[in-house]
Image (cartoon, helix red, strand yellow):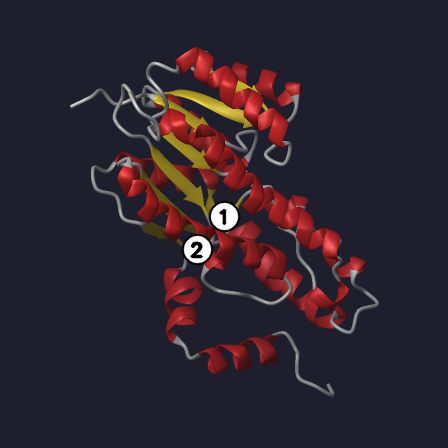
Amino acid sequence: MMAKSKNILITGASTGIGYDLAKVFVRNGYTVFGSVRKQADADRLSKEIGENFKPLLFDVTDHASVDLAAKTLNDEIGETGLGGLINNAGIAIGGPMLDLSIEDYRQQFEVNVIGLIKVTKAFLPLLGAREGHNSDPGRIVQISSVAGKIGMPFMSPYVGSKHAVEGLSESLRRELQLFGIKVIVIGPGPIKTPIWNKGVTEDTSLKFKDSPFAESVNIFQNTFVKDAITNGWTSEKAAGIIFSAFEKRNPKARYALVPQRLKNWILPRLLPSKALDKFVQKNLKLKPGK
């Protein structure tokens, strides 16, 4: 058997799950190459995580910078390759479809879907999708979401992007059997990460105050989003579980990391769609003629 590479690439490493994944992999003997968009973040993470964290400056939506990072990394570690790619970079844009722009949707998909595809294609050779690869095939971890399986209102850009990630990963997992590269989907539920403050923010209700959905958006903001921020798992806990899944000899195709599992995962998937529709309608005051 060939040796396992201890090099890992994590996108979106500056905060949240990506940051805590970088720390847990370094603690366990890996060299982590983490993508960040700002030099200040590169300097901060290098200082906080240590010498086995190597920042890569690129934005997943800037395809030229992704290609440059792939070339730089190949020049540095081409012989040993990558033991894993964790596609973690992502944003969350929220609001009613009626009131969102096409640009909102385009931005959401450029980051969460097209960016993920670009990064995956650029680094696949280092994971083992090439002749003469000198290490065990690497693994790809796709950070999806509970939203990749369950669609809540006022999150259609994010939900759509994560459904796309789920489908892409299903096909990719079967394709990459040719090279022995495993694809693992991680579907977190409510996690305390800055993604909520960057996309579905506290001023979302004000942004849509003139929308016919204004009251419902306000309720949603003060229930679902605040619950995710206050009652979700910490990103440290999520990172530990993801690392354990990555290390398994025969990992599952998908892991659901969902706190309050009965409420947030089991029941929404067991209930008939129309029953869940009525629950949402009642709780978010979405009844016609209200």
Secondary structure beneath dot 1 equals: strand
- Residue beneath disc 1: 191
Nearer to us of marks 1 and 2 is 2
Q: Quadrant of the N terminus?
A: top left
Secondary structure beneath dot 2 equals: helix
Q: Is residue 28 left or right of residue 97?
A: left
Please state which of residues 221 and 153 is positioned toward the viewer in this rendering: 153
Q: Is residue 212 visible?
A: yes
Q: Quadrant of the C terminus?
A: bottom right
Q: Is residue 100 left or right of residue 46?
A: right
Q: Is residue 202 visible?
A: no
- Answer with the quarter of the image where residue 95 lies: bottom right
Please state which of residues 12 and 173 is positioned toward the viewer in this rendering: 173
Please state which of residues 224 and 42 is positioned toward the viewer in this rendering: 42
Percent across and percent down for residue 235 are: 47, 40
Q: Amino acid at mark 2?
A: Gly
Judged from this view, the residue extending furthest toward the right is 210
Position above or below: 194 against 256 = above
- Residue beneath disc 2: 167
Looking at the image, which residue is at 47% across and 22% down?
A: 33
Q: Amino acid at mark 1?
A: Ile
Looking at the image, which residue is at 54% across and 21% down?
A: 69
Percent across and percent down for residue 184 are: 35, 44
Looking at the image, which residue is at 56% across and 66% down?
A: 152
Looking at the image, which residue is at 56% across and 75% down?
A: 280
Q: Is residue 207 left or right of residue 287?
A: right
Q: Residues within 10 Å of mark 1 (few under 14, many from 20)?
A: many
